[in-house]
Image: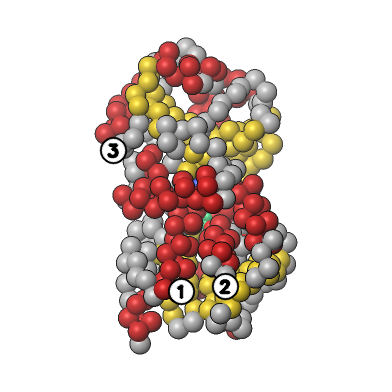
Amino acid sequence: MRISIIGAGIMGLSTAFEFASAGVEVDLIERHQGPGLGCSFLAGGMIAPWCEVESAEPLVCNMGQEALHFWTSDVPVATRQGSLVLAAARDRPELNRFSRLTSHYKRLDGAELALLEADLQGRFSEALFFPEEAHLDPREATRALAERLAAMPNVKLHFGVDVSDPADVPADWIIDCRGLAGRGALPDLRGVKGEMLVLRTQEITLARPIRFLHPRFPVYIVPRGDGRFMIGATSIENEEEGRITARSMVELLSAAMTVHPAFGEAEIIETGAGLRPAFPNNLPRFRIEGRMVRANGLYRHGFLLAPPVARRLRRTILEGAYFPEVMDVDSRERQRA
Ligand SMILES: Cc1cc2nc3c(=O)[nH]c(=O)nc-3n(C[C@H](O)[C@H](O)[C@H](O)COP(=O)(O)OP(=O)(O)OC[C@H]3O[C@@H](n4cnc5c(N)ncnc54)[C@H](O)[C@@H]3O)c2cc1C
């Protein structure tokens, strides 16, 4: 069996890895000159299934736990030091709300928080600590996946190839993982704008991601090593790509400076804005049409959900398994027909 996968974002790479690991011949075709240069390039990389339940379906938590295993065992690029949730004293109700909606956390006082993150000493009187969560650098993760694929004899990587119509690609199965670029075949797919920036400072050390709650502008800070911190991300229901607005920049920076004033002296080394591919329910799914599969809709959870979705996709194609939670309702019927 030969499978062609279009798009080497996190969905395409995870899918290629699943099929290739099962011994299938895989062609992975990407229009950019390397992997992970689309929407996946901008992600924060929190592998935080329990925190996500605050605003996502329980399915995200269940599948996210599979991703924790994937990123710490199968392709071990994640750092598992837990994650922290903080709020300014005036936003304490936000922290209480978050705690009511989530599980698998410990409530810390200021002294316990300082034992975990010395640079936050005296800054917050309480925090939520999710000890089992992890984080990764998405660029390192996509690179690592591509390197693993390049080393497999049954995989061919084709970079710099723009596929105008996936249906024309010769293969037993074609898997369309083009992200938002695949919306022509998926009319209910929409783009949700996300903006981020990367700061560099040697004045602050953090070992784990921080979610900073705010009633209007929740923000996260993800340490990337070498004094770099990804600050993200806005979530805006419009499809304007490519630029960060002045308002978003101010909000992200002001939240970062509330977490630690030394961020005010940091160097801004990168800004970015992209469109997350999302279905109306903000959950991923794949649709099977003949020998074509469309896998999409990762929304805010690319690195959290791509590995478990890819695993279900592989089991559907190779074993005839059925996963209603991620399959288009009538996919199976079409497959039978
Ligand atoms: C600011 C921001 C922050 C985010 N933070 C997080 C986070 O913390 N954690 C998380 O898990 N997710 C996060 N996300 C979401 C995550 O980035 C997406 O869910 C994920 O990247 C979608 O992956 P994908 O593979 O479907 O799409 P993409 O990464 O866009 O990949 C699609 C690929 O297909 C290629 N392609 C398109 N058309 C063609 C063609 N015709 N021929 C060949 N190749 C083609 C593209 O070049 C691209 O490489 C964030 C997103 C944004 C914008």
Q: Which residue is mark 2?
A: 24
Position of 157 compared to 112: left or right?
A: right
Marks 3/1: CA–CA distance: 37 Å
Q: Dot 3, crowdedness within 10 Å: few (<14), some or many (≥20)?
A: few
Q: Amino acid at mark 3?
A: Leu
Instruction: Mark 3 and mark 2 in contact? Answer it, CB < 8 Å.
Output: no
Q: Amino acid at mark 2?
A: Val
Q: Dot 2, crowdedness within 10 Å: few (<14), some or many (≥20)?
A: some
Judged by depth in the image, the label closer to the viewer, 3 or 1, is: 1
Q: Amino acid at mark 1?
A: Leu
Q: How is the image coloured?
A: secondary structure
Quadrant assignment for the C terminus: bottom left
- When the figure is inspected, residue 296 is found, relative to residue 227, above or below; the finding is below
Q: Earlier in the sequence, mark 2 or mark 1?
A: 2
- Which residue does the image show at 49% across and 78% down from the upper left? 292
**SS for callout 1:** helix
**SS for callout 2:** loop
Specify the quadrant of the image occupied by residue 147.
bottom right
- Which residue does the image show at 50% across and 36% down from the upper left? 80
Marks 2/1: CA–CA distance: 9 Å
Which quadrant of the figure shows ligand 1? bottom right
Checking the image for residue 5, the label placed there is: none
